[in-house]
C-alpha cells in the first residue's frame, strides 16, 4: 500500500515541478525558502453527521525589492489544468532609507494569505501559481509555481466507530533535504517570522530545516555542535570560560507547524505532522572591532574554509550540515542558488545529512519524495543537491 501511495504524488510532482522562471519586474526576487503552505479543513454537519466540505489554503510568502503601496499577492490553484480557486490579498511592505539596512532589504510579505470562501475539494498534487500584483497599475507578474500535495486522514467517532469528517493536510516529505543558513545581523528578526520574533543585539547564525517529528521532536531538543573547518576541529580554547560555548538552541514558530490525527477506533490513533526548526548556532560573524560581533563565540570571519558541523543530543547524531565560508567571512552560495533557487540576502542553502535510519526526532522519512525536489515541488538542479537528497534514509510509513 505504501508504495502505491507514494508513486502517485512523486510522479505528479515530477510532472508539475519543472522550474518556472520568474516574470518579476527588475529589482524584485522571490524567496523560495520563506514560502509555507498549510490547509484548514472546513467541516459541516448534515442529518447529524459531520462531513468535510473541503479545505482552504493558508500561505506565507515574501518578495524582495521595493514595491509601491497597495501591492498584493494573487494565488491561482489548479489541478490537471483546471482552476480550483483564485485568491487575492494585500501584502505588508517594508521600506528602508537607504533601501538596505544592516542586511534587511525592502520586501513585500504576508504571513496569512487565506480566503475562507475559496473551498477546494481536490486531493493530491495541486499547482499553486504565485503572482505579484503591482500596486500602481495592478499588472500581474508570475513569481513562482509551487506544487502542494494535499492528503487526508480518515476519522471515526464514538464507541460505534461512526464516520467523522476527515482532516486534510499538506504533505511535506519532499522538504526533508532542504536546509538553509542565515547570517542574521543584530536586531534582525528570524528568517521565517516576517515581522516580530526574538532578536539579538549581536550578529547570529541561524539555521532552518523541517521535520516530520516524533513526539520528542515537537520542540527543538537542546544539544551541542561538533564542528570542523577543513577537516580540523574548530578551536574553542579562547571561549572555554563560556559554559555554553557549543550549545544549540532554537524554537518552532507557531506559524510553521501542524498535525492531524487519523482515528480508526477509540484507542487507535496515528498522528502525522510537520514542523520547521529554527536553530541559533554557537557562531557569530563580522571582523574584529565590529560592534555587532559576539565576542563570546567564534566568528566565521576568522575561519574561512569548508565547514561541517554535527548536531548532537544526548550522544545521538541528529543532523550534519556542510557549507563553505569565504575569506571575507561570508558564507558562499550553494550551486543550487545559481540555478534559480531564491533566498534572502545573506542566506544560503546547505547540504544536510540525516543519520542512517533517521534520528530520534524523525517519525517518517520518504526518500523518493525528497529526491523529487524541495521547496514545494522544485526539482533539484545541482549535482550536489541531487546527491544529498539521494542519501536521505527511509523511516516509517509515508502516511497513517
Image (cartoon, rainbow, N blue to C red):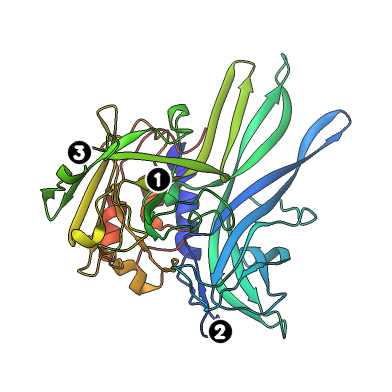
Determine which residue is flagged by label 1. 279
Q: Which mark is residue 25?
A: 2
Q: Position of residue 234 (x, y in %)?
A: 16, 48
Q: Earlier in the sequence, mark 2 or mark 1?
A: 2
Task: Name the front one of labels 3 and 1.
Answer: 3
Task: Give left or right: position of 350 versus 68.
Answer: left
Q: Position of residue 6 (x, y in %)?
A: 45, 45
Q: Is residue 362 visible?
A: yes
Q: Which mark is residue 240?
A: 3
- Residue 118 is drawn in which quadrant? bottom right
Task: Name the front one of labels 2 and 3.
Answer: 3
Q: Earlier in the sequence, mark 2 or mark 3?
A: 2
Q: Earlier in the sequence, mark 3 or mark 1?
A: 3
Give SS at disc 1: strand
Q: Is residue 124 visible?
A: no
- Residue 8 vertical position relative to residue 99 in the rendered view, above or below: above
Give the distance between the C-alpha atoms of the residues marked 2 and 1, in whole angstroms.
33 Å
Q: Position of residue 210 (x, y in %)?
A: 44, 46
Crowding at dot 2, Cα within 10 Å, few <14 / some 14-19 / many 20+, comes out as some
Give SS at disc 2: loop
Please report the residue visible at 55 percent of the width from the left and 73 percent of the height from the top.
106
Amino acid at each position: 500500500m505504501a508504495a502505491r501511495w507514494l508513486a502517485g504524488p512523486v510522479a505528479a510532482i515530477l510532472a508539475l515541478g519543472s522550474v518556472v522562471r520568474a516574470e518579476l519586474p527588475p529589482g524584485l526576487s522571490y524567496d523560495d525558502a520563506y514560502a509555507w503552505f498549510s490547509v484548514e479543513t472546513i467541516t459541516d454537519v448534515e442529518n447529524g453527521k459531520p462531513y468535510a466540505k473541503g479545505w482552504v489554503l493558508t500561505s506565507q510568502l515574501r518578495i524582495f525589492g521595493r514595491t509601491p503601496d497597495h501591492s498584493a499577492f494573487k494565488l491561482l490553484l489548479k489541478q490537471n489544468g483546471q482552476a480550483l480557486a483564485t485568491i487575492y490579498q494585500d501584502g505588508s511592505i517594508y521600506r528602508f532609507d537607504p533601501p538596505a539596512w544592516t542586511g534587511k532589504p525592502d520586501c513585500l510579505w504576508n504571513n496569512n494569505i487565506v480566503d475562507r470562501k475559496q473551498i477546494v475539494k481536490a486531493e493530491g498534487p495541486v499547482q499553486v501559481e504565485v503572482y505579484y500584483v503591482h500596486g500602481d497599475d495592478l499588472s500581474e507578474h508570475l513569481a513562482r509555481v509551487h506544487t502542494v500535495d494535499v492528503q487526508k486522514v480518515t476519522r471515526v467517532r464514538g464507541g460505534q466507530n461512526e464516520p467523522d469528517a476527515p482532516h486534510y493536510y499538506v504533505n511535506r516529505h519532499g522538504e526533508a533535504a532542504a536546509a538553509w543558513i542565515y547570517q542574521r545581523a543584530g536586531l534582525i528578526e528570524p528568517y521565517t517570522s516576517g515581522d516580530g520574533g526574538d532578536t539579538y543585539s549581536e550578529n547570529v547564525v541561524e539555521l532552518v530545516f523541517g521535520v516530520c517529528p516524533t513526539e520528542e521532536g515537537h520542540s527543538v531538543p537542546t544539544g551541542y555542535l561538533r564542528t570542523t573547518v577543513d577537516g580540523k576541529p574548530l578551536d574553542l580554547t579562547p571561549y572555554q570560560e563560556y559554559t555554553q560555548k557549543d550549545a544549540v538552541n532554537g524554537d518552532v514558530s507557531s506559524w510553521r507547524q501542524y498535525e492531524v490525527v487519523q482515528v480508526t477506533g477509540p484507542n487507535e490513533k496515528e498522528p502525522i505532522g510537520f514542523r520547521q526548526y529554527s536553530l541559533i548556532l554557537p557562531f557569530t560573524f563580522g571582523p574584529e572591532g565590529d560592534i555587532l560581533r559576539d565576542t563570546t563565540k567564534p566568528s566565521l570571519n576568522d575561519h574561512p574554509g569548508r565547514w561541517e558541523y554535527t548536531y548532537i543530543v544526548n550522544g545521538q547524531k541528529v543532523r550534519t550540515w556542510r557549507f563553505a565560508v569565504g575569506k571575507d567571512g561570508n558564507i558562499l552560495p550553494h550551486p543550487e542558488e545559481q540555478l534559480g533557487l531564491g533566498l534572502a540576502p545573506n542566506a544560503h542553502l546547505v547540504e544536510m545529512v540525516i543519520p542512517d535510519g533517521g534520528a530520534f526526532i524523525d517519525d517518517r522519512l520518504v526518500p523518493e519524495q525528497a529526491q523529487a525536489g524541495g521547496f514545494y515541488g522544485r526539482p533539484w538542479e545541482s549535482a550536489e543537491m541531487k546527491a544529498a537528497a539521494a542519501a536521505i534514509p527511509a523511516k516509517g510509513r509515508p502516511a497513517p
